[in-house]
Image: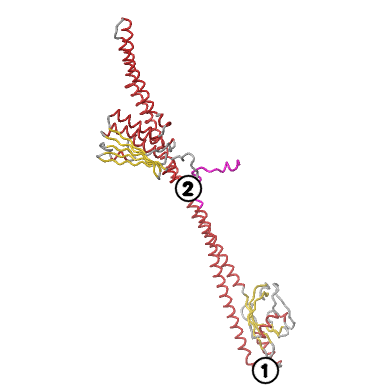
Amino acid sequence: MAMFARLRLNYGQKLFLVATLPLILTAAAVSVVVTLQSRHLAEREIETLEAQLIAAKREELKNYLSLARTAFINIYGRAAPDDHRAMEQVSQILAAMLYGQDGYFFVFDYDGTNLVSPRRTELIGRNWTGMEDPSGVPVTDELIRLARFGGGYHSFVWPRPSTGERTQMVAYVIGLQDWRWAIGTGVFIDDVIAAVTASRQQVETRVQRTFLLIGAAMLAALLLVFVTGLFITIRERRLADAKLKRLTQRVFDAQEEERGRVARELHDGISQILVGVRYALDTARRRLASGDARAPEMLERGTAHLATAIQEVRRISRDLRPGALDDLGLGPALKALAEDFGKRTGIETTFATVVFRNRLDDEAKIALYRLAQEALTNIERHSGATRVEIDLRGHAHGGTLRITDNGCGIDAARTGTGGGLGLRNMQERIDQIDGQLVIRSSASGTEIEANVPLTHLLKPQGQSETVPERRRARS
């Protein structure tokens, strides 16, 4: 478990891994495909080259044997099957026909006895039936068999006369059926083998070079992704830090504004009322001390001022956190807010709702209530409206709060991201609950619409978990 804990990746490492893993897999797949195809094509080319070289060697052997046949054909054509003198003449002619450093003609009779071998005289006069090369390939028997059927090619390992080194040889043999002779010659194909080996080495070199190029390209791509990711990460972190700083500052501004508002209400409302209560009580005390009959009047005035102070404290407390929001739900809390707003400002305020049955969760209720408070504050301060309509209802997609006034509207520049603190607060509150805020404003009024998704609507009590969300939204 400790090892897995150490292997945990942070967000940047996960992002880099997600970006580079497909690149690495793609590069590996491309490398494998390119290697397989290169080797396949190169092998075909090598096989073609080898076939062409061997075909050229075979054609060369045919030409050599054709020359030899031309040299003895007249003697063979006039001789009888048992003409030993003619046989000796032909043997001498073939023994004298040497070419190149290692080229010569050989003769075996059909019984396996060597009759002509000018470069390997130790073979002459001995029977070599059953002779094989080091790899176990039959030599004499196969040459005789080919000669019996008219002729053909045979490949085997044979010592090179000039060096004694064993190497691959291709021989071509024909048969003189009247004399029961197998006449042939051969060429060593070590040059062909060397050419094929060199071609294969070139192929391996090209494959390795291709691997290096693909690896270099992949490394360059990884470095590019890493540098780009690092740059983007640093840039996004700076932007996030700047955004967090601005958000923190807005939070501080909102706190200071709220504190200033409460301080003003306490100073302008509660403080003035309490000063009046103190003045009334002091006046009543002096009148009681002097026996003035008007003392009860001042006591009653002080009592009235004290009742007003109590109501003002309740109003401020309700503005900070209305009890109706927790006890009765959003609808009654907004209704009380609308009624108090209308009485306090003199603006005609109406509230309409479709009963939610307290189905909104606490986060959504608080967000919508604070949005309504902010909207009514803006209407009171800036709109000059004479009528406000508040509509709250649930529907198949969630819930909607709509606040409409007939004021002068909001400046177009303030409805965007650079709007005032109140508009930004409303937008951020709705963003926190994954909702949508739409502000429509013109010279004839403003409409603020906040939509809450279904995820913030609570399931009715007793409702099964399998009931579709859309169906529950309509209930």
Q: Which kind of residue does numbered mark 1 sit on?
A: Ala
Q: Which residues are magenta?
A: 1-21
**Would you place residue 61 above or below residue 449 in this image?**
below
Residue behind mark 2? 226
**Would you place residue 196 above or below residue 253 in this image?**
below
* Quarter residue 124 falls in: bottom right
Nearest the eye: 366 or 246: 366
Badge 2, how many Cα within 10 Å: few under 14, some, many 20+? some
* Quarter residue 390 falls in: top left
Give the secondary structure at mark 2. helix
Is 195 on the left-hand or right-hand side of 354? right
Nearest the eye: 325 or 196: 325
Spatial separation of the CA atoms under disc 1 and disc 2: 90 Å
Instruction: Please name which of the two marks, 1 or 2, marks the residue nearer to the observer.
Output: 2
Residue 119 lies, in percent from the top left, at 68, 79
Tag 1–tag 2 contact (CB < 8 Å): no
Residue behind mark 1? 79
Residue 423 lies, in percent from the top left, at 34, 36
Residue found at the very far top of the displayed protein: 290
Is 91 on the left-hand or right-hand side of 235? right
Residue 147 lies, in percent from the top left, at 66, 84
As for residue 3 lying within the magenta part, the answer is yes
* Quarter residue 258 falls in: top left
Q: Quadrant of the C terminus?
A: top left
Q: Earlier in the sequence, mark 1 or mark 2?
A: 1
Give the secondary structure at mark 1. loop
Badge 1, how many Cα within 10 Å: few under 14, some, many 20+? some
Q: Quadrant of the N terminus?
A: top right
Is 186 on the left-hand or right-hand side of 264? right
Residue found at the very far right of the displayed protein: 126
